Image (spheres, rainbow, N blue to C red):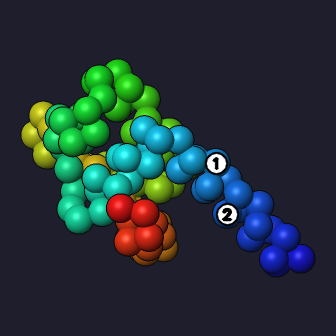
């Protein structure tokens, strides 16, 4: 039973990260937190695309946002996601 529930949870995570734009954002956050502008530049995406992907990743619980003055910074929320992204980067990048 537990394995079935976990497989559903992991499947949802994989669906969320299974988009090139969202995957790029997660990769960009691997080494440190970043502002929206930094993420846009690194990932070469428009502000609207970046915002859309960040909202999706945050609602899925994969990233965390914090506000510092007028800037929003994003970071990976879960150590398991950090480990997964590091492994994917090592294998494919």
Query: Residue 15, labelled with which disc?
Result: 1
Residue nearest the viewer, comparing 34 with 71:
34
Residue nearest the viewer, comparing 82 with 67:
82
Q: Residue furthest left?
A: 69
Q: Which corner quadrant of the image does residue 5 belong to?
A: bottom right
Report the number of discs. 2
Q: Is residue 47 left or right of residue 55?
A: left
List x then y, in percent, for residue 78: 44, 68
Residue at mark 1 to residue at mark 2: CA–CA distance: 9 Å
Residue 72 can be seen, yes or no: no
Residue at which label 2 appears: 10
For marks 1 and 2 on the same chain, the one whose residue lies earlier in the sequence: 2
Give the quadrant of the C terminus. Answer: bottom left
Q: Label 1: few (<14), some or many (≥20) within 10 Å?
A: few
- What residue sits 28% from the left and 24% below the top? 47
Q: Label 2: few (<14), some or many (≥20) within 10 Å?
A: few
Does 20 sit above or below residue 77?
above
Q: Residue furthest right?
A: 1
Residue 60 can be seen, yes or no: yes
List x then y, in percent, for residue 10: 67, 63
Does 34 sit above or below residue 2?
above
Residue nearest the viewer, comparing 71 with 22:
22
Give the quadrant of the N terminus. Answer: bottom right
Q: Is residue 42 left or right of residue 45?
A: left
- What residue sits 20% from the left and 50% below the top? 34
Does 26 sit above or below residue 32?
above
SS at badge 2: helix
Residue nearest the viewer, comparing 80 with 43:
43
Q: Is residue 54 left or right of residue 66?
A: right
Q: Which corner quadrant of the image does residue 38 belong to?
A: top left
């Amino acid at each position: 039973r537990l394995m079935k529930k976990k497989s559903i949870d992991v499947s949802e995570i994989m669906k969320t990260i299974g988009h090139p734009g969202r995957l790029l954002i997660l990769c960009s956050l691997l080494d440190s937190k970043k502002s929206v502008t930094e993420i846009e530049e690194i990932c070469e995406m428009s502000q609207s695309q970046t915002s859309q992907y960040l909202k999706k990743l945050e609602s899925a619980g994969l990233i965390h946002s914090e506000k510092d003055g007028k800037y929003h910074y994003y970071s990976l929320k879960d150590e398991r996601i950090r480990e997964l992204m590091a492994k994917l980067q090592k294998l494919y990048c």
